Image: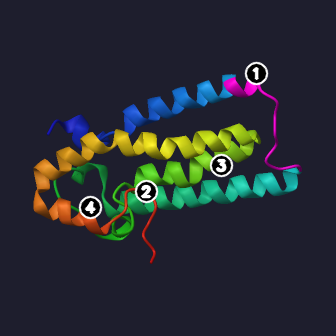
C-alpha cells in the first residue's frame, strides 16, 4: 500500500469530484429559477452552525479513533469506526455539505447533497478493496456490520 493511499485514501479524489459537482450545480442554479430553503436568516444561520459543529465533532472523534499515522496499519473498529466505515467522509456528507446547501439557500444544492452519496459510495470502492486486501476477512466482516456513511442505529 502506497503511503499517500494509506493516509488519504479516496478523500482527495472525492473532494475534487464534490467541488466539481458543486460548480456544476452553481451554474445550473444560475440558469434556473431560485427556490429558497429558508425564508429567514434567523433559522438558516443557526442550522448551518449546528451542522458545522457536528461535522467538526465527528472529524475530531474520527482522528482520535484513528490518527493519520496509523491509517492502513491496523484495522480500527472502535470509536467513530463503530458507527461509520468512513467517518471523515461521513462528516462531509452528513454535516458540512448540507451546511453549504443551507448557507447557499437554494433547493438545487440539496440535490447536490443527495447526489454526493452515490458518488462517494462509488469513490470509496477502491479504498475498500485495498482495505480488504490488507486486512482480509476481518475487514469484510467489519463491512457487513458497519455502514459506510449513515450509521445503523437500529
Mark 1 closeness class: few <14, some 14–19, many ≥20 residues within 10 Å: few
Left/right placement of residue 90 relative to residue 105 reads: left
Mark 2 closeness class: few <14, some 14–19, many ≥20 residues within 10 Å: many
Residue drawn where x is 43% and y is 49% of the image:
89
**Quarter location, residue 118:** top left
Q: Is residue 76 above or below residue 93?
A: below
Label 2 vs label 3: CA separation? 17 Å
> Which mark is on residue 99?
3
Report the residue marked by disc 2: 149
Residue drawn where x is 38% and y is 62% of the image:
84
Residue drawn where x is 20% and y is 45% of the image:
129
Frontmost of labels 1 and 2 is 1
Which quadrant holds the C terminus? bottom left
Pointer 4 or 2: first along the chain = 4
Residue drawn where x is 39% and y is 59% of the image:
62
> Which mark is on residue 127?
none
Q: Is residue 13 above or below residue 105?
A: above
The secondary structure type at the circle numbered 1 is: helix
Report the residue marked by disc 1: 31
Pointer 2 or 3: first along the chain = 3
The secondary structure type at the circle numbered 3 is: helix
Q: Which residues are magenta?
A: 28-39
Report the residue marked by disc 4: 143
Label 3 vs label 1: CA separation? 23 Å
Label 4 vs label 2: CA separation? 12 Å
Nearer to me, 74 or 118: 118
Label 1 vs label 4: CA separation? 42 Å
Amino acid at each position: 500500500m502506497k503511503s499517500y493511499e494509506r493516509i488519504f485514501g479516496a478523500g482527495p479524489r472525492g473532494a475534487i469530484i464534490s467541488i466539481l459537482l458543486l460548480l456544476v450545480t452553481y451554474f445550473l442554479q444560475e440558469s434556473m429559477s431560485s427556490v429558497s430553503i429558508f425564508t429567514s436568516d434567523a433559522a438558516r444561520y443557526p442550522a448551518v452552525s449546528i451542522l458545522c459543529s457536528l461535522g467538526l465533532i465527528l472529524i475530531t472523534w474520527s482522528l482520535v479513533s484513528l490518527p493519520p499515522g496509523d491509517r492502513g496499519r491496523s484495522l480500527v473498529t472502535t470509536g467513530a469506526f463503530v458507527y461509520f466505515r468512513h467517518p471523515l467522509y461521513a462528516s462531509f456528507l452528513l454535516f458540512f455539505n448540507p451546511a453549504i446547501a443551507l448557507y447557499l439557500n437554494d433547493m438545487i444544492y440539496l440535490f447536490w447533497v443527495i447526489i454526493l452519496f452515490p458518488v462517494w459510495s462509488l469513490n470509496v470502492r477502491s479504498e475498500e478493496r485495498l482495505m480488504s486486501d490488507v486486512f482480509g476477512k476481518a475487514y469484510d466482516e467489519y463491512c457487513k456490520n458497519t455502514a459506510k456513511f449513515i450509521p445503523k442505529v437500529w
